[in-house]
Image: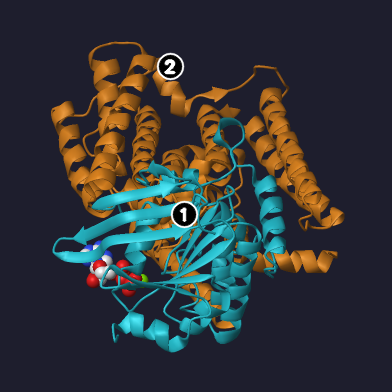
Chain colours: A cyan, B orange
Amino acid sequence: MRGRTPLLALRQVSRYFGAVEALVDVDLEVHAHEVVALVGDNGAGKSTLAKVVAGVLSPSSGQVEVDGEPVTISSPSVANQLGVASVFQDLAVCENLDVTANVFLGQELRGRAGLLRDGEMETETRALLEHLTIRIPSVRTPLRHLSAGQRQAVVIARTLIGQPRIVVLDEPTAALSVAQTAEVLTHIQRLRELGLGVILISHNLNDVRAVSDRIEVLRHGRNNGSFPASATHEEILAAITGAA
Amino acid sequence: MNAIDSVRDILTRNMRQSGIVIAFVAIVVLFAALNPNFLSPTNLTNIVLQYSYILILAIGMVMIIVAGQIDLSVGSVVALTGAVSAVVVVRQGLPWYVGVLAALFVGLLVGIWQGFWVAYVGIPGFIVTLAGMLLFRGLTFLVLDNKSLSPFGGTYYDIANGFLNGLLGGNGFDVFTLVIFGIAVAGYAVSQWRTRQGKIAYQQTVESMPLFVAKLVAVAVVVMWFGYQLSISRGLPIVLIILAVLIIAYTLVTQKSVFGRHVYAVGGNRHAAELSGVKVRKVNFWIFVNMGVLASVAGVVYSSRMNGAQPGAGNMFELDAIAACFIGGASTTGGVGRVGGAMIGGLIMAVMSNGMQLMGVPQSMQQVVKGLVLLLAVAFDIYNKRRASVLR
Ligand SMILES: Nc1ncnc2c1ncn2[C@@H]1O[C@H](COP(=O)(O)OP(=O)(O)O)[C@@H](O)[C@H]1O
Ligand SMILES: [Mg+2]
């Protein structure tokens, strides 16, 4: 793995909220075909890091690189253009819109005069769901009629629109049952098989160890250790809690 | 999919939409039974003319409500734009189209003003337009010097009172009107057919052929009958043409354009829309600009119909427009509602007003009935929603 240019790299990234140091000099690299887990206690700065990468927050200092090139991710649509797709912690979907509309939201296929190419979007959505082996009755179902697990599957499918290369998932299983969690983890593995770089944020160590290639620990906004997936529960837990 | 399944599918999936159509038909049948004049050609024409400006307002209002906002200022904007137009045409003696353009321009400025405060300063639309309601009413009094200004006369008067009649001749009925309605029906049939073919091509489910044809025939019969009634009366009202163009254009914008999709997204979940890359501020800005312009169109139509401008014009129009949207199925929490629904909601109010007038029901009682209808329509909505969430 070493030596290749990473898809995404954070170099000495910091982010402050007034006096709160949410991120301090954080380094992180993600390569293609790799699931990197980001773990840490509540308030460790995981969501802040996800939002920096997604273009929702800008870093106070430090550099973000995509393909080794320094970039400024100033908004979610810039992130989309750079091939970065994100799933946020709080199940952000529009319940009034159907599956297709949610999957393509903000990146709709436009035809003449700004009109929607609905048929094409539906076909593509159906292909996408099939690809990820997501089972949903119809792509025209409004999201309010789907279960939490199905919604999360839609949100994950959504990340594949516009051929992203990096996917950031912030606690994608937090609101899900055991069975639904297992399905979502399968989808994540599918993303890796497709050649994407994935950042998986979680504080469930079992989930993380099941699917990730590498585990990075954040503590009080700082890097606090990097582990292979084979590391023991205790080692990782010690880094998370700081009980050295 | 067999016929029964598809009927059930249409009814359950669009419970609210079909409920509103059924309610509309029931009200029409009720008044037709109670009063023989109700379906007379003259009266049908009157209903269109009397309520056209509310329908125009409801088109813009439904987009605002879908986005989770509200606009209380449209009545005052109707008055202000009509007043400006009257000053230009009646007082200054400039041609009718200068008055129309001046009104549209004022509507645009009003929209930009309110859009700015809502979208870029972040003040809720409720407050901005409450302020606008006072502000623009005050400006109307200033512009008109507290006095009415009339008459417009001429071409300006014809905008809301004129008919296209006799263009193609006809004996006792206007051929031109029938031709236009024929084209409309044909256009509707073709677009429905193409939608159906498109769905088949993308392997979506469609209703069965007999049901599809039955639906088309039913629509065609009703529409052609209405066209015939107009044609044996005074012909095709110009307002109806304006209204039809607006309805078609805005149905496209809301249902088929990226902008329309984003309006629904912002109303459904503003936060999610923003994180998905939807430019929420832009959406909020443009729906208010759009409302300002549509309110000025309504202002032109209303001042033309009244053949003058009064300081108190358009009072309470905002409430009628908002009621039309909610009766027509818009959700009070945003994200749900359609132009077509709002139009039927508006027509329900129009038909009720007109029908009760014909029966000599006093004004006070009419208000009571309309208030109750609004309440029941929204209650029905909430009841449906609750039942749906229990079923899930
Ligand atoms: N918008 C914000 N304003 C102020 N403080 C914030 C904001 N977002 C996060 N924080 C703070 O930054 C720290 C890291 O938060 P977060 O990234 O959400 O942690 P995690 O996702 O790891 O639980 C916390 O102390 C939190 O209170
Ligand atoms: Mg978090």
A43 lies above or below B91: below
Q: Quadrant of residue B370?
A: bottom left
Q: Earlier in the sequence, mark 1 or mark 2?
A: 2
- Local SS, label 2: helix
Q: Taking the image as drawn, is residue A102 in sight?
A: yes
Ligand 1 placement by image quarter: bottom left
Foreground pick, B85 / A34:
A34
Specify the label residue B155 is tagged with.
2
How far from the left and from the top, in percent, is residue A182? 60, 80
Which subunit holds the residue at mark 2?
A: B
Residue A204 is left or right of residue A152, and the answer is: left
- Residue at 76% across, 65% down: B7
Q: What's the amino acid at mark 1?
A: Ala
Q: Which quadrant of the view contains residue A29?
A: bottom left
> In the image, residue B82 lies at what x, y percent?
30, 29
Please name the residue that numbered disc 1 is placed on: B265
Comparing B300 with A78, the one in front is: A78
Label at residue B171:
none
Mark 2 beta carbon near ligand 1 (under 8 Å): no
Q: CA distance from mark 1 to mark 2?
A: 42 Å
The number of callouts visible is 2
Q: How would you rate the neighbour count of disc 1 (Cα within 10 Å): few for under 14, some for 14-19, many for 20 or more?
A: many
Provide the chain ID for the residue under circle 1: B
- Secondary structure under tag 1 reads helix
**Is A49 located above or below residue A68 in the figure?**
below
